[in-house]
Amino acid sequence: MSGSITTLGISLELSEEIEQKRAQRQAENETLQEVFAPAQLRWGNVDWIVTGFLAFIHIGALAAFIPSMFSWEGLAICVALHWFTCSVGICLGYHRYLAHKSLKLKKPAEFVVMLAGSLSGEGSPMTWAATHRLHHQKSDQDGDPHSPTDGTWWSHLTWLFVKRKGENRDLLWKRYIPELVERPMMKFFEKTFPLWLWAQGLVLLAAGTMYGGWMTGLSWLVWGMCVRMTFAYHSTWFVNSATHLWGYRNYDTRDHSRNLWWVALVAYGEGWHNNHHAHPSVAPAGHRWWEVDMTWWLIRGLRMIGQAYDVKDKLPKGRKADDVPAEEADAVAVSATADTAA
């Protein structure tokens, strides 16, 4: 900037702009930290839609103990949909593809994994990815959306009960997923996410009724939706809670992440959580020969048929982690703003 006053090679105007950006980011950090604080869970701030839906699914799962509700077809649907929604939808789609950019997908595969994620009932794709990126930046620190340091039940479940305003969601998107908000497929699934949840229930009930009568329809609904989603929810939630409490560590991360074998089994590889927090963008979650990662098998299969590419599969060596402290991440962001402005 010709003719401007400079300090250490930085123009005064640019220096002021950097300070404004820094102050803005600090204010946004404080807002998001408050939004996800356990203190927000109070009677007047409960999201009754989310809480009611989760209660409905869990109560519906109890119907599985009624002998007349069991059918082998219902059990098979339960197992198949658990794999499809958890491994394909959440682990591959929402987590490794959207949140961490561990691979790229071509359009047919991208649509299928976003559909699978929506059918899981674990949230819309953009909000899930943004919240997860926030979790990594603030892992086990103030501002982490679901850390066991704020309580085991908070990290496992009750953080979901808090009602959060639309402007806070928009801020979360702006800060953590700016590259996703204008993508047509993301916008489509963001808008239609609730419809997929109810549609799957109606399809299961109708298909089962046509196949074997009213009781078969109810069996398919109970097992294919309620039992499957209840098990899928807790499979995923154990990653937030149990793998930050118990297990072993391959890497020296700044948080409390652990590798826990039984969570890895029920969550299709996500239980190798210390590996993942140490090197978030690496597509395989299992870094040792015994660390079974079924989602990684799926990614390899998609790569073989040309639906996945640019897969980040190089395993690290040593115990050093790539995780970046939150303060450094914010400093890098402000520095990048300055470089762009210059």
Image (cartoon, rainbow, N blue to C red):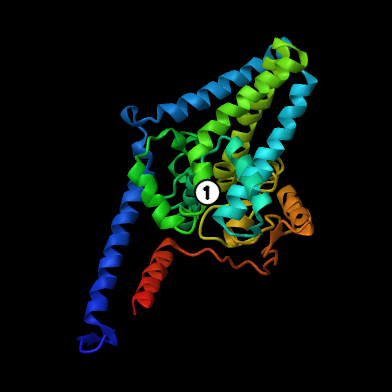
**Image location (x, y in percent) of residue 239:** 59, 44
Tag 1: amino acid: Met
The relative height of residue 14 versus residue 48 in the rendered view (above or below) is below
Of residue 290 and residue 137, the one placed in the foreground of this image is 137
At horizontal 47% and vertical 24% (from top left) the residue drawn is: 52
**Image location (x, y in percent) of residue 109:** 68, 50
For numbered disc 1, what is the local secondary structure? helix
The relative height of residue 158 versus residue 25 in the rendered view (above or below) is above
At horizontal 36% and vertical 51% (from top left) the residue drawn is: 171
Whether residue 321 appears in this view of the structure is yes
Q: Is residue 22 left or right of residue 140?
A: left
Residue carrying label 1 = 186
Q: Is residue 200 left or right of residue 256?
A: right
At horizontal 68% and vertical 44% (from top left) the residue drawn is: 87
Of residue 185 and residue 49, the one placed in the foreground of this image is 185
Quadrant that contains the C terminus: bottom left
Q: Is residue 60 left or right of residue 191?
A: right
- The quarter holding residue 231 reads top right
